[in-house]
């Protein structure tokens, strides 16, 4: 399917078992997945299906207990040390003692960029997320949607080709969320980044993705992978087209299939 | 009766004034003069008695008319404090001769002051400057009344000077002994307290960073630190005096020991206070220990560190003063307190305590101001 | 109890390290005086003998742990508890005024807190002073209270207990005000929908919500109370109590006595805090709190 472009993320027989007080929990089991350059892949599934865990394994925030994972052809740890990806969390996680521009500068400071280059990149990424003019504000002076945009800017600032997003809009209301979805698509089209996006919203997954990975719990595994047939150009009202609804129905079926028992 | 809004404070004040009028003489000389009209006995409140009673009753009455709260507060404020001032200034020269009406009138004035504070507490001004001013004025009136009652009661009842000197005498003593007090402050605060505070807090901080690097150390030090903070550490004072001599070094040592553990415990707790998500974020940047410490964990720990600095500002002062009870050169606040107590110069003791209180508040206030500037981002500072 | 086992090894090894360091410092600090003694007696002891001597001086600069332990044991278990040299007797003297002051302080603190929470005037006028007064070195007043009360004939337990009361009511007041205000708006609104009277809201919502705060602040208060009692004993002319033992030790350079009095004070403090903690846990459990 993405045979021409080199794999950005390649997982094979990936498994991860947590040791908890109630015994071992299989968060991931036998996950095989290849993500090519420039793809927008969504991970969807009920809570406990391991979608966030998978993202964290890609980011080297968790170590797999079996199988292999490579990011940009390296191990996940090497990729992290090379700063191969930007990560966006469920909450904005901005530092309250730094202004918006200093927050965006944080990764740049750690990577040791020059002042001038920092300033240039801050300006560019804040433009990209439409936050120009808010450089000197503190995070707590901004709305939730603006905070999350700032955190996306922070993830974009150091120009990693891979963007890992863990339910970034989950805490926002639907109106803001629609708006940010649209902006995110434009951003993706403009920058040609590879995006891995965790969500529990079917419309969001279908609207954004070129590929939807449906996951199911106990043990966390991939139960279906759906290629999107939607065009790259997607206005918001594409969500009312029969094509969109058909893909959404397939996702819903996939979720139901992986969810055979009642709970 | 729509134009009336009675308050129990004002009503009670009027009742007390009426009783005072019925009882008659305000002081023993006045009673003597009344009993023997032919003798020329000078007595207090010759011309002001009626004025005081009238002021109190009129202020109480006006306050019960339906007028704007601010006007009511001003009337009460002026009435209560004018009466109090006349009362206190009138008793001069006749200390210890006050009779029941004196105290009744004092109580009436105090009730009016209370009513004034109650009215002010009920105000909800829109302007933030007015709100801030109220936040200062209300406790200021309360504090003033503690001093007024203290002054009026000690002088009216003639409480022995060694038991409780009136605030005015303490004030005079402070003004009269500035060089001595200054020397004591220099010895105790500028030498022992500051040095011990800086070294003790600094050592606690550095140990906390060390403990953070070595988890074994942290797991062991934290319970010990928590336990030690409940112990009467002040008891090491005699040992420190034996080791480091009578001068300020031994006091500084006590202060170091007292301030070390609060800083250690709070910093360790603060370093654990940064969120999981923020720490994961630093991990995705492959950020090392020191960059993470400086950019994330220390700023997140700042509120805890300042909490320790505030606790320590009080502990340091207590430690230095109490350590001086165990032996000092002939200067120092603790030394002055213990020797002047022995000589029954209680006003000097109070003067020293007032200076210590002032120094403590200023010390704390400076730390709190720095805290506001540094942790401006914290919800407790930026306000909700 | 996993966390307990996690801590046990580090805590004991750090304490063991402290004891070892203590011995090392005892030798170092006591050595000059011992050398002085030896040269006066024209003795040249071997290294082992010399170290042994530094750890067995009658008035060492730093007594060795075993000297303190022996002194503590003798003064605690071998003396009749009525003897004025018995640590049990002295600890009891201090403890009794601590407990009296603590009880008064807690009661006073709770009453003031209830007043502050329910009377807006008190909240706005008194609360700032309560907070400000915590920045003042209260203990400096201690000797004056003792001496002034002695001048009007009040001596013994009461003056010391007053200092303890003074020190212990601050934390209780502040903690209780926080606790009584801790119920969420939602819970207060719920009581409001029941048309509950203020006293019902107080007893059924505010008081239960404040209990954890009360016990946390009582732990601080009981420790402060003990410090108050000890400092209160300093100017009484060293009659009895742990503070008196400290002062007497300082006068006669009886360093071992000072250390064992310190140990006694620390044990009393630890026990008091523990008792309050256990009481808090029992009350918490009786109120259906989750076992932590």
Image: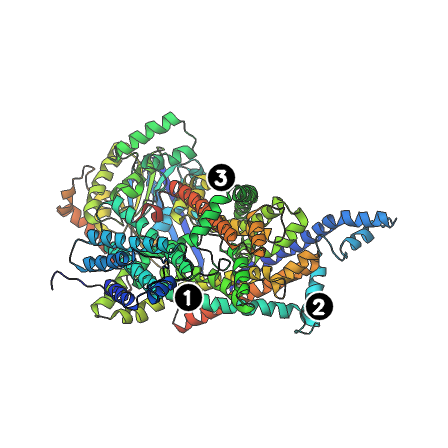
Letter of the chain that mark 1 sits on in the rendering: C
- Give the residue displayed 30% in from the left and 43% down from the top: A140
Task: Report how far apart the C-alphas of labels 3 and 1 lie in the structure.
Answer: 48 Å
Disc 3 crowd, CA 10 A, few/some/many (<14, 14-19, 20+)? few
Q: Secondary structure at mark 1?
A: helix
> What colouring style does the render use?
rainbow
Could you tell whether A183 is left or right of C4 in the image?
left
* Residue wearing tag 3: B290
The spot of residue B256 in percent (x, y) is 57, 47
Q: How many marks?
A: 3
Indicate which disc residue C74 carries.
2
* Residue wearing tag 1: C108
Asked whether the residues under marks 3 and 1 belong to the same chain, the reply is: no
Letter of the chain that mark 2 sits on in the rendering: C
Disc 2 crowd, CA 10 A, few/some/many (<14, 14-19, 20+)? some
Letter of the chain that mark 3 sits on in the rendering: B
């Amino acid at each position: 399917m993405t045979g021409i472009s080199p794999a950005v993320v390649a997982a094979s027989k990936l498994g991860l078992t947590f040791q908890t007080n109630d015994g071992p929990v299989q968060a991931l089991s036998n996950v095989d997945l290849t993500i090519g350059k420039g793809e927008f892949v969504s991970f969807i599934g009920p809570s406990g299906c391991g979608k966030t865990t998978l993202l964290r394994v890609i980011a080297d925030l968790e170590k797999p207990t079996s199988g292999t994972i490579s990011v940009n052809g390296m191990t996940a740890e090497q990729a992290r040390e090379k700063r191969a990806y930007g990560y966006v969390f469920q909450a904005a996680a901005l530092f309250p003692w730094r202004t918006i521009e200093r927050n965006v500068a944080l990764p740049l400071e750690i990577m040791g960029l020059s002042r001038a280059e920092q300033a240039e990149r801050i300006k560019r990424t804040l433009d990209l997320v439409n936050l120009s003019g808010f450089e000197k504000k503190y995070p707590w002076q901004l709305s939730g949607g603006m905070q999350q945009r700032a955190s996306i800017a922070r993830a974009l600032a150091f120009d990693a080709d891979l963007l890992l997003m863990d339910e970034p809009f989950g805490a926002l209301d639907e109106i803001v969320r629609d708006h940010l979805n649209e902006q995110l698509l434009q951003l993706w089209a403009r920058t040609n980044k590879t995006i891995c996006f965790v969500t529990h919203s079917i419309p969001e997954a279908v609207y954004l993705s070129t590929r939807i990975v449906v996951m199911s719990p106990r043990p966390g595994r991939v139960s279906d992978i759906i290629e999107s047939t939607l065009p790259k150009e997607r206005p918001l009202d594409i969500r009312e087209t029969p094509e969109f609804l058909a893909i959404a129905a397939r996702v819903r079926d996939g979720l139901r299939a992986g969810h055979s028992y009642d709970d | 009766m729509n134009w009336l809004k009675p308050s129990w404070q004002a009503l009670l004040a009027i009742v007390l004034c009426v009783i005072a009028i019925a009882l008659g003489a305000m002081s023993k000389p006045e009673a003597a003069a009344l009993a023997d009209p032919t003798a020329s006995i000078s007595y207090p409140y010759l011309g002001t008695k009626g004025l005081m009673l009238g002021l109190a009753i009129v202020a109480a009455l006006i306050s019960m008319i339906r007028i704007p709260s601010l006007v009511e507060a001003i009337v009460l404020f002026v009435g209560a404090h004018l009466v109090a001032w006349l009362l206190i200034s009138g008793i001069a020269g006749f200390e210890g001769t006050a009779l029941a009406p004196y105290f009744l009138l004092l109580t009436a004035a105090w009730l009016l002051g209370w009513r004034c504070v109650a009215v002010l507490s009920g105000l909800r001004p829109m302007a933030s400057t007015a709100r801030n001013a109220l936040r200062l004025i209300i406790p200021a009136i309360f504090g003033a009344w503690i001093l007024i009652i203290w002054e009026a009661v000690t002088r009216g009842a003639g409480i022995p000077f060694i038991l409780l000197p009136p605030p005015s005498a303490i004030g005079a003593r402070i003004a009269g002994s500035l060089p001595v007090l200054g020397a004591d402050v220099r010895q105790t605060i500028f030498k022992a307290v500051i040095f011990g505070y800086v070294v003790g807090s600094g050592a606690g901080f550095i140990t906390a960073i060390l403990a953070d690097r070595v988890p074994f150390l942290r797991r062991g030090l934290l319970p010990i630190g928590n336990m030690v903070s409940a112990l009467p550490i002040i008891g090491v004072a005699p040992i420190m005096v034996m080791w480091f001599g009578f001068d300020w070094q031994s006091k500084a040592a006590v202060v170091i020991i007292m301030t070390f553990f609060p800083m250690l415990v709070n910093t360790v707790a603060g370093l654990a206070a940064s969120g999981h998500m923020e720490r994961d974020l630093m991990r995705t940047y492959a950020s090392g220990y020191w960059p993470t410490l400086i950019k994330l964990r220390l700023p997140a720990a700042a509120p805890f560190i300042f909490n320790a600095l505030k606790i320590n500002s009080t502990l340091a002062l207590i430690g230095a003063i109490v350590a001086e009870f165990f032996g000092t050169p002939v200067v120092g606040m603790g030394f002055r307190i213990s020797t002047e107590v022995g000589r029954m110069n209680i006003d000097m003791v109070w003067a020293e305590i007032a200076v210590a209180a002032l120094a403590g508040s200023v010390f704390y206030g400076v730390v709190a101001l720095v805290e506001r500037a540094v942790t401006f981002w914290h919800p407790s500072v930026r306000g909700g | 109890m996993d966390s307990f086992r996690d801590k046990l090894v580090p805590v004991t090894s750090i304490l063991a390290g402290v004891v070892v360091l203590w011995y090392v410092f005892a030798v170092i600090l006591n050595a000059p005086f011992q050398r002085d003694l030896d040269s006066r007696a024209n003795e040249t002891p071997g290294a082992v003998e010399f170290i042994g001597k530094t750890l067995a001086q009658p008035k060492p600069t730093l007594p060795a742990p075993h000297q303190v332990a022996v002194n503590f044991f003798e003064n605690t278990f071998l003396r009749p508890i009525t003897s004025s040299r018995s640590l049990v007797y002295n600890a009891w003297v201090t403890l009794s005024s601590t407990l009296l002051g603590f009880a008064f302080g807690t009661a006073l603190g709770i009453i003031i807190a209830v007043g502050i929470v329910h009377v807006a005037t008190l909240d706005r006028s008194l609360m700032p002073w309560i907070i400000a007064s915590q920045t003042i070195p209260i203990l400096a007043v201690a000797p004056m209270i003792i001496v002034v009360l002695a001048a009007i004939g009040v001596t013994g337990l009461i003056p010391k207990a007053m200092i303890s009361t003074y020190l212990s009511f601050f934390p209780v007041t502040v903690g209780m005000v926080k606790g009584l205000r801790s119920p969420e708006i939602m819970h207060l609104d719920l009581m409001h929908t029941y048309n509950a009277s203020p006293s019902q809201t107080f007893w059924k919502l505010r008081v239960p919500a404040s209990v954890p705060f009360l016990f946390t602040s009582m732990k601080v208060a009981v420790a402060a109370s003990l410090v108050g009692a000890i400092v209160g004993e300093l100017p009484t002319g060293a009659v009895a109590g742990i503070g008196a033992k400290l002062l007497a030790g300082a006068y006669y350079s009886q360093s071992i006595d000072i250390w064992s009095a310190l140990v006694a004070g620390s044990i009393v403090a630890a026990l008091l805090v523990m008792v309050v903690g256990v009481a808090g846990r029992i009350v918490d459990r009786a109120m259906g709190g989750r076992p932590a």
